[in-house]
Amino acid sequence: MSKTAFSAAADPGFSALPAGAGEVVVAGCEAHVCVLQTVLSLLPGGHRVLLVADAVGSRDPADRTAAIDRARQHGAEIVTSEMVLFEWLRDSQHPKFSEVQKLLK
């Protein structure tokens, strides 16, 4: 989806988010602008918002740090890609476990 609003949640195309989606995993560029505004827009809707710290960036590392800190202060959970992947798998017997593990090495 292409967007013009800084918050992806403000874009009309964002209605693709399934109704009742309780958990939203957020990653992207410009942590201090688009990523942060998306997180801040989702939190009041009662979503569990997971900000993937190793999958966001900013040109200035200080901006990235400030964005992650602010998102945490507003209630986002700060996670890593590996944390998310293993939470989705839930068990080493998952059929995609080996495939995911290869991605991480």
Image (cartoon, helix red, strand yellow):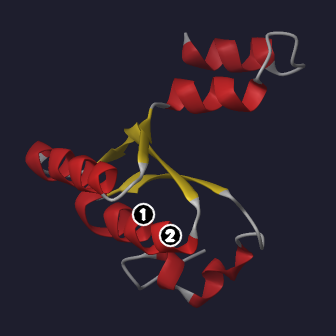
Give the side of residue 98 with respect to residue 54, left or right.
right
Residue furthest bottom in the image: 12
Q: What's the mark number on residue 22? A: none
Please give the residue where the numbered disc 2 appears in the rendered image: 42
Q: Residue at the spot x=80%, y=15% of the render?
A: 91
Secondary element under disc 1, as helix, strand or loop, is: helix
Asked whether 102 or 8 is in front, the reply is 8
The spot of residue 38 in percent (x, y) is 43, 69
Task: Tell whether label 2 touches label 1 (CB within 8 Å).
Answer: yes
Residue 39 numbered tag: 1
Give the spatial CA distance, label 1 vs label 2. 5 Å
Q: Tell me the kind of residue under disc 2.
A: Leu
Q: Residue at x 72, y 32 (%)?
A: 88
In the rendering, at what x and y percent does residue 53 appear? Answer: 37, 38
Name the amino acid, label 1. Val
- Residue 63 relative to residue 93: left or right: left
Q: Quadrant of the C terminus?
A: top right
| Vertical comparison of 29 with 54: above or below | below
Badge 1, how many Cα within 10 Å: few under 14, some, many 20+?
many
Where is residue 80 shown, x and y percent of the image? 45, 31
* Quarter that holds the N terminus: bottom right
For residue 73, side relative to residue 21 (left or right): left
- Residue at the location (35% across, 71% down)? 37
